[in-house]
Amino acid sequence: MQEPKDSRGLISSPQAEYDALRFVSPESPCPYLPDRMARSEAYGVDALDGVQYEKLLARGFRRSGRIVYRPRCRQCRECRQLRVPVREFTFTRSMRRILRRNADVRVEITEPRAVPHAYEHYLRYLDQQHDKSMSRTYDAFRDFLYDSPMATLEFQYRLGDRLAGVSIADRCERGLSSVYMYFDPEFSARSLGTFSILHEIEYCGRMGLDYYYLGFYVAGSRTMSYKARFRPNEVLIGDEQWVRLRA
């Protein structure tokens, strides 16, 4: 039976048959661990609901724009989905300090919109936080963060009338899945990345959601291992097999 496809020839429902690969990327140097090669399998999607996407998360997929993908590296399995059980989450002393430091931050929750001043913050964030591998065009910014096939929220972190940071997250059946967070580098001392995670975990609690999905955790990676600080947490070790990550 042939996979249903949309007008662009993309698989419109990857949940129907996981093993019918649409695209496997060529190998390239791993961005997280030195001396390793990485590749992914990916599908194009036109629509996802929260139930479907949570099932995909439990099979190792993530969303980027209208693409869902998961690592398919030949000799490495270190990219693991990580989620926080909201009701069991414990704030550390340092996390409480970050909450106090940002007590004056006002948070607005809106539908995602790729507005020019947010794009300017995004460019400054990339210049400070990343190498030159990510595209800096407005179209890439919009397609990556704002062209979503599912219910998605934008958390705007504001100081007075100023936009300090933006977090994008997908609404799943039982949780919230973080997509990306960027902020104005002028506010780097406030640890807005950590603050946004803490705020969104609290938001999940208020909304009666069970899990906050933090994306891929990579042990030994400077840019990804920080996620283990949010405890307790669970990592995916196989399809639908979540286990507690040990301290």
Image (cartoon, helix red, strand yellow):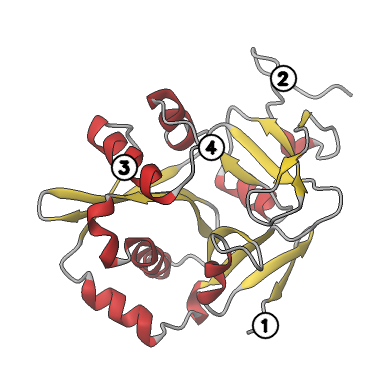
For the point 34% across and 38% down, which residue is it? 123
Q: Are marks 1 and 3 in contact (CB under 8 Å)?
A: no
Where residue 89 appears, x then y in whole percent? 48, 79
| Vertical order, 12 against 184 (above or below) | above
For the point 37% across and 87% down, which residue is it? 93
Disc 3 marks which residue? Answer: 124
Name which of mark 1 and mark 2 comes first in the sequence: 2
**Label 1 to label 3: alpha-carbon separation:** 36 Å
- Name the secondary structure under disc 4: loop
- Name the secondary structure under disc 2: loop
**Label 4 to label 3: alpha-carbon separation:** 15 Å
**Label 2 to label 4: alpha-carbon separation:** 31 Å
Disc 4 marks which residue? Answer: 133
Disc 2 marks which residue? Answer: 5
Characterize the local packing of mark 4: few (<14), some (14-19) or many (20 or more) Cα atoms within 10 angstroms: few
Of residue 158 and residue 39, the one placed in the foreground of this image is: 39
Q: Is residue 235 at all visible to an observer of this figure?
A: yes
Q: Which amino acid is tagged 3?
A: Arg
Q: Are marks 1 and 2 in contact (CB under 8 Å)?
A: no
Q: Nearer the viewer, mark 2 or mark 4?
A: 4
